[in-house]
Image (cartoon, grey):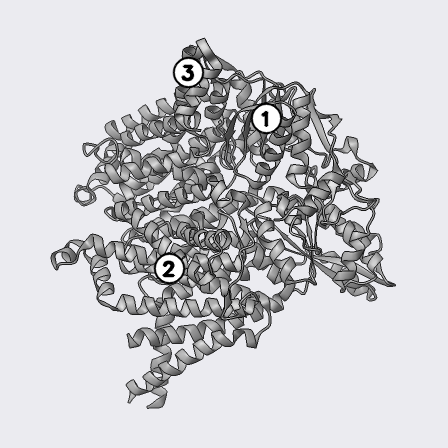
Amino acid sequence: MGLAAHLIKYLEINGSQKGMVILDAILQQTVNGLMIGSIYVLLAFGLSMIYGVLDIAHFAHGTIAIGGGYITYLMLNSFGLSFWLSIIVAMIIIGIIGLLVERLAYRKLLNAPPINSFIVSLGLLLVFENVLQYLFGADQLAIRTNYTRVFSFFGASVAEIRLYVFISSIILTIILFLFLHKSKPGKAIRATAQNKDAVVLMGVDVKKVYSMVFIIGSAIGAIAGSFIGAVFAIFPSYGAHIILKGFAVLILGGLGSIPGAVIGAYVLGLSETFGAGFISSTYKEVIAFLIMILVLVFKPEGIMGKGATKL
Amino acid sequence: MKRNFRDLALFSLLFLLLLFGLLGCSEEQGAVIDDNDVEEEIEQVGDIKILKVGMNDALTGAAAVYGLPQHEAVQLAIKQINEAGGINVDGDIYHLELIAYDSKGDMTESLSVAQRLINQDGVNIILGWATSGMTSAVAPQIAAAESDVLILVGTAGERGITAKGHPNIFRTRPPADFTGGAAGDFVANRGIEKLAILGQLKDSFYQQYVDAFVEYYEDAGGVVVTTEIFSQGDRDMYSQLTSIQSMDIDGLFVPGYVEQAAFVYRQARELGIDVPIYGFTGGNEDQFLAVASEEDMDGIFDLRPSELTVEVLGPSAVKFVEDYTNEYGKAPTPNAPFAYDQVWVIKYALEAAGTVDDISKIIEAIRELEIPEEVVMGYIPVNGKLFDRSGQAYIENIAMLWEDGRWTVYDLLASDVEGYSEFLYNLDE
Amino acid sequence: MILRNTFTLSNVAILSAIALILLLPVLTNNRYIIHLTIIWLIWIIISQGLNIIVGYTGYASLAQGAFLGVGAYTSALLTLRLGISFWLALIAAAVVSMLIGAVIGYPSLRMKGHYFAIVTLAFGVIIWIILMGWYQFTGGDIGLSGIERPTFFGISLSSNTNYYYLTAIVCFICIAVKTNFVNSKFGRAFKAIRENEPLASTVGINLLNYKMLSFCMSTAFAGIAGSLYAHYMQFINPSPFSIENSLNAILAVIVGGSGTIVGPIIGSFIFVYLPESLRFIEQFRLIIYGLLLIVVVLYMPKGLIYLFQSLYTKLFSLLRNSKT
């Protein structure tokens, strides 16, 4: 249904109330978009750092993140840990897996053409997805929390768990920003992203930086995976689905830029909800890719512009 | 240039040799035999013959949620039949042996699987077929090219599969629109006048269901105000639901897989949508409660084929649930018996036909087959037989209502089996 | 002397390879083998095409699977709806894929590296979603059925064996066209672009034109393969044209050896037969497939062809030594 037809429908149906209803819908859709955006943010952090520092399009990131969701599920249901504690365990385990991936697979490809690391990431995706399916089955699992209240503000409904996801994502963004700009290892990561050769001359162990980036990126991915499991559900092939959104976010914000990724994530989340809500849900999935193409064709450096430095 | 050609030629040679080597090897290795115990047992007994049946289904990938339960149900039925003395075909005792391959739900792979079963393993009966895409692609092609192969389709619900007039295709699951029409009538009769539809309408199966649903619903005086879509990967329905919420409706209809529909229900309640909700999902309590709470689900209807609704089925269904749970340590999914019943159809058809090779005789026997005692689903006979002229079986459609934390039988939906069977037979697809 | 020997050896080898492929249906009546080989031949066309843009020009396109779909749908719709003959539809499939390739290539080819890969991926997904969503035209997920196998001057190609010959011959033609093409001045320009774009530009190569030519060639090959695929399967829906097969095509090229004629043949072979031969370990086969990919790229980054090539050189020198 086209936008115009949709609006006409509002007019016909809602008569005098139309203005109010549309405003309500816009507010609700904005809230919806921000919630989805905050999950994209968490997913894009790892992707963006890994791309920024190592120049790798890490296609297995989504699946590894979903693995984090599975660990949280397991901790919560089989070991009786609390939701937040489970997430921390998942972060640790997935961080180690990230380290192994970097050490065992990507490290050998540092000087190879980019297409090679790309293929390896696809191989990793296949392996992780099928290991998850072998261990946990193909059925979707939802992580059940006690956060089932629904808040209402200015007429918009906000589910409790979504609110926590939103808040956590903002807090994590701030922490990551401070880490990258104020701490010594964080500064080393940024410096490596900007100029590898200079960093080597300054005596920074680049390989350690690479490992660090993978550990941190994967651990944040585990948070994303756990939130996906708590708000939605996890299943092995979801990683491959969500990673495409992750790349759309990256392109939007400019590849390898963290502030860009944050803005890109919210822009994508809002565009998807508004597109599906007011234009057509048939092509909801197209929106991410359409935006990606438009940005790449007209503003290939991302919506942040040329001013955006790496990380 | 010359070098290129020389390389090309030599490698082609090398590869052809490799090809033959590889296929030679795989022929010797044979396939995974699912029931090793049976094989050993037979070697001891000696005078029992083995009939291999093939299974073409999604055992990995997204469609495995339908394929794996079918696989387990078939293994269970084979085990039960073999343990109870096998199949008596004209005085010879046969035990069944299953050769199952994974199609991943992919149509090219599924064709490979079918070709392999027929040509490599010498199978002439192929069961399984849980998903519409691979079945629509492969079953008619194989049925047309291999008239001596019998295809028994399970959960795949796309109408065209049995509408193409292939005598060697039989299907235990009724087509989607058989249920859709009855459901449309039901919703209109509940007094719902302005309905919003939010469903998995890109999926052929649901598309056909909804087409029939809308036709019957609008004929009965209802109006479909808006139609929104969600996709396979969608778990966030907020944007569609918000859009629906802003419209003037008195009912919501949700046709889609349980994985997504459960989220529609939960999120509709989160957003405060309080109109009556009708669905077509076929999901069981565990599947819904994994996602949504009991309050979310309260008062929701599911308008679906009766499938494994033990309350409206006979003792064979109770026994099946018990046996399956004992065997696999978990409850069967609602679609599992579609495949379980296929095996019993084979048993009785072989016994009636008195042959395991002559497919035309076996087909004849299946056509004449009355509903066997062991089958689980609540089949409605067509002219006293299990399958109609198109090779299609029908089961009751029911309205289930979620009450007190579980699905309860609300009512059987009035379905016109003879009429639909006639329509399907005359359909030109 | 040696040169003449290799030349005759080469002739003999080409002839025996062609003969073997053509004789395959005579040598075996196993339709499973014929089926797999048809799929292999179709994949050779797909990956040979992709190799033009990926291997020779250095641009990794992730839309090949979608163009396979463009070809398949063009051919299927033309024959089903307009009753056009298969042969015209086959050509139309190539032309339409080429045209859509041009439309997509024009904006995309101004980007490099990961950007190009991701933008083609996005276009590929969009094509797929259109195939799925525009169901009034494409049949959506229900798909198009009843696509007929062609006839050739009164000879029906409806049996798998006859269709096998058709696929084999089209595949030979495609390989021959590609071989000549990449060895022509166009091919040299592509390689120049791959090695050093600014330098290629300074020696007077019109970058965008050549890149467009390369990309459109690759999509045309996908279109041809799509048409063959549609009429082989006799049913299509959007599922085989998703991103998965775009990735598989890239894998076939890279694992086999990009920038060569033989590489994609090897890669397609691995792609078609390896998962099949791993069926006996059903549950683990995709895990093993994934691991093998990783191992190949890590330890044989130039593709399997170099492994075979070094084996072959050793063998050849062994032969030569034994002769002297």
Residue nearer the viewer, B298 or C218 = C218
Q: Which chain carries label 2?
A: C
Spot occupied by residue C160 in the image (x, y as percentages of width and height)? 56, 66
* Quadrant location of the N terminus of chain A in the rendered image: top left
Task: Please rate how many residues cluster around mark 1, counting C-alpha atoms within 10 Å: few if below 14, some from 14 to 19, many from 20.
Answer: many
Side (left or right) of C230 relative to B57: left
Q: Label 2 to label 3, Cα distance in Å?
A: 49 Å
Amino acid type, callout 3: Ile
Same subunit: marks 2 and 3: no
Q: Mark 2 points at which residue?
A: C221
Tell me which residue sits at (43%, 12%) in the image.
A18
Spot occupied by residue B215 in the image (x, y as percentages of width and height)? 62, 31
Q: Mark 1 lies on which chain?
A: B
Locate residue B211: give its quadrant.
top right
Q: Label 1 to label 3, Cα distance in Å?
A: 23 Å
Spot occupied by residue B193 in the image (x, y as percentages of width and height)? 61, 19
Q: Label 1 to label 2, Cα distance in Å?
A: 45 Å
